[in-house]
Image: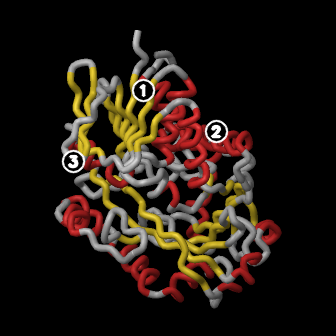
Amino acid sequence: MRPLHYAVIGGGINGLAVARQLLLDQPDVRVTVFEKEDAVARHQSSHNSGVVHAGLYYEPGGLKARLCRRGVELVRTYCEQNGLPYDECGKVVVALEADELPRLEAIHRKALANGVPDVEMIDGARLREIEPHCVGLRALYSPRTAIVSYGQIAQHMAQEIVQRGGVIRLNAVVQRVFEQGQHVQIELADGEVHGDAFDFVIACCGLQSDRLAQQSGDVATPRIVPFFGQYYVIDEAFKSHVRGLIYPVPDPRFPFLGVHFTKRIDGQMTIGPNAFISLGRENYQGDRFSLRDVADYLGYPGFWKFASRNMAATLRELKTVISERHFVREAARYVPALSEVSVTPAVRGIRAQAMEPDGRLVDDFVIRQSSRVTHIRNAPSPGATSSLAIGEHIVRNLIHPHGTI
C-alpha cells in the first residue's frame, strides 16, 4: 500500500507546523510544502512582534484561547529542545484611567478562565517594582508572557521537515486546488497541474488565504483586509527604561490594541505597532502600491461598513502614521521618561485580518474543511504563538479526528 501524500500550501510558520506534525505523527507519509517565495517565512512569520502570547484576551472556550494556551507549551518546549532563544520577560497591561479598570478586571477573568499561569492584578506600587518607569493606577501582570524569534523557529522547522523526508518546493505559486475523486490536484500560477495527485491538501496562505480558497471553490467570505503595523526601535541608551512588555488596556470601541512597548529577543526595545489600512497585502516596506489589493477592499461592502463604524480609531491611528513624534508620545503615556526618545524604523508587519460582509472583524481562528482540502481562513495574532498547536489540531482533530491515518 502506497504512503499517503500531503500537500501543504504556504511555507510560513503555520504551514511548516502542519507539515512537521504530519511527519511526526506518521513518519512514512509523503509531505510536500509549496512556497511561493525563494525561502520560507518571508511574510507574517518574520514580520511580527515575537511575543508568545499567554492567552489574556481571548474568549474562553474558543479556538484562539485553546490553541494559544497549548501553543505556548509547544513553542516553549520546541525552543528548549532545539536551543532557540525563549525569554519569559513578562507583560503588564496598564490602566491609566479609572474608566479602564472594569475592562482590566474583565481581561483578568478571561485570563483565569483560560488557565494563564501566575497572572495577577497589581496596584501602582507593585507595577513600579516590575517596571520602575511605568505609570498607572493598576495593571494586570502576566510574568510568563515571553518573546522569541518566530522567523528562527520557522527556519528550524523547515530544516527539520527536510531531515524527516519532507520536500519544500520554493518559487511555487499555487493558483488553485481541486478535488478529483479520491485525490486533489494542485494548479500552479503558470497553469501547470502538478504531476503528483495528493490525498489531502492543507492551505496556510495567510494574506492570500481568501483568494486561494475562493479560486478553489470555497466560499468568498470572510475577505482578507490588510492592516499594516509599524514598529520603531528606541535609542539603545534608553532601552533599560522598559524591562519587558507594557500594553494598554484594549478599548472595545477600537478594533486594535494601540501602540505599546515590546522587548525583542535581541534585547532591543520597540514601540508599536499602530494599525492602518495597507496599500498592499505584502507592502512591508511601505513603498509599494498594489492596485489589485486596494481595489479588493475598496470594492468590498464590508470594508466601508467597518470604516464608517471606526472613524475615531482611523483618525487616532492616522496621527501615528503621519507623525513619528505622535507615535512615540502615544506609547510614552505609560513611560513618560521616554516622551522625547529618538527612534529608528524597524519591522513593519501586515495583519491578515478576515472581515465579514457586514464589516465585523472575525475574532476567532477560522479553519474550513471539505473532504480532502483544509483552508486556514483566519489566523491573526496569536497565530504565531498558536502555530504548533494549530498544526496539531489540524492533523489530529480535523484530517484524522481519531489521531490515526
Is 147 positioned to the left or the right of 46 in the image?
right
Residue indicated by mark 2: 74
Q: Residue 357, position in %: x, y? A: 23, 53
Q: Residue at x 49, y 53 (%)?
A: 41
- Which label's residue is closer to the chain start, 3 or 2? 2
Q: Residues within 10 Å of mark 1 (few under 14, many from 20)?
A: some
Going by the numbered disc 2, the residue's amino acid type is Leu
Q: Residue at x 39, y 73 (%)?
A: 313
Q: With respect to residue 231, does 108 lie above or below?
A: above
Q: Which mark is residue 190?
A: 3
Identify the image quadrant of the N terminus: top left
Q: Residues within 10 Å of mark 3 (few under 14, many from 20)?
A: few
- Which label's residue is closer to the chain start, 1 or 2? 2
Going by the numbered disc 3, the residue's amino acid type is Asp
What secondary structure is marked by label 3? loop
What secondary structure is marked by label 1? helix
Q: Residue at x 40, y 54 (%)?
A: 37
Q: Which mark is residue 398?
A: 1
Q: Which mark is residue 62?
A: none
What secondary structure is marked by label 2? helix
Is residue 109 at all visible to an observer of this figure?
no
- Which label's residue is closer to the chain start, 1 or 3? 3
Quadrant of residue 7 within the rendered picture: top left
Mark 1 to mark 2: distance in Å? 19 Å
Is residue 105 at all visible to an observer of this figure?
yes
Between 125 and 78, the residue placed more toward the observer is 78
Q: Residue 316, position in %: x, y? A: 42, 79
